[in-house]
Image (cartoon, rainbow, N blue to C red):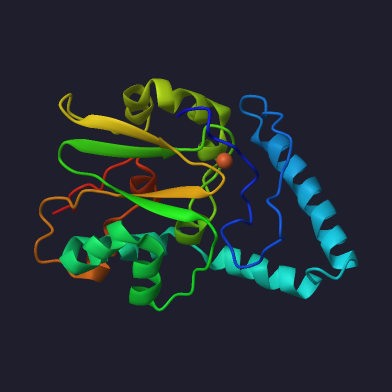
Amino acid sequence: MSGSHHHDHDHHDDHHHDHGKPHSHPHSPPAPDDDDGYDRYEVLLQTAIRELLDEKGIISAADLHRQIDYQDSLTPAIGGKIVAKAWTEPDFKKKLLADPLKAINESFELDITTPLDLVVLENTPQVHNVVVCTLCSCYPRMLLGIPPAWYKSLDYRSRVVNEPRKVLAEFGTVLPDDVEVRVSDSTADLRFLVLPNRPTGTDGMTQEQLAALVSRDSMIGTAVVPAPKK
Ligand code: FE
């Protein structure tokens, strides 16, 4: 949460292409509740970059469309499978915590290549993790897909650091007083994935059944994974 949060825009950083340089956009922060304005700005910027890249023959329109298709194919289901595997396979969990991308690529036959660091934050009965990007909207898109609108909102970004319990309560997540809440601030080259606690009452469940319980928000940390309904 310190001043070392140097920043550039992350919308494509999670993916295979490499523009050579980090994107940068001026951080004129969006007005509160003005995600639409922010998105319009992003669209304009992306259009300008796309045309420039195409014109210079750096990235063709076809490549870009493939990239967009790839982005659209990413959903929180990938994250859910990772969490379920970590809950049921201690060896995988150990590898996941030590070297997340390597563990994920090997175990799921994926080829996520990114210059970004990924850190998996393990919740425990004593510690609950929640993730934010205070300056813009850095997010582990390679595992969770497109971020929800609230994640990009100034309200969430500014408040979760100072009053995490209150913000979590607004999401319906009320944690016992003896649980420590840790807020991790994403940066231009670092993404976080929360490994939520496995709920009780799930002993006999398969990985597939477990994965279905894992919500996107539980991997951001604004939710916990509830025990399955009986
Ligand atoms: Fe960001």
Left or right of 145 in this view: 103: left
Q: Is there any visible trace of residue 109 in the rendered image? A: yes
Residue nearer the viewer, 184 or 196 = 184
In the drawing, does residue 226 fall left or right of residue 218?
left
Nearer the observer, 154 or 135: 135
Q: Which residue occupies 27% across, 64% down?
A: 95
* Ligand 1 rendered quadrant: top right
The one nearer the camera, 19 or 144, is: 19
x, y percent for residue 90:
16, 64
**Residue 21 figure quarter:** bottom right
Q: Quadrant of residue 93?
A: bottom left
Query: Percent from the top left, x then y, of residue 186?
Result: 48, 41
Is residue 90 placed above or below 223 in the rendered structure?
A: below
**How many circles with numbers are drawn on the protein?**
0
Residue 93 lies left or right of residue 119; in this view the side is left
Taking the spot 22% from the left edge, 47% from the top edge, the residue there is 226
Kindly give the residue lying farthest to the bottom in the view shown. 109
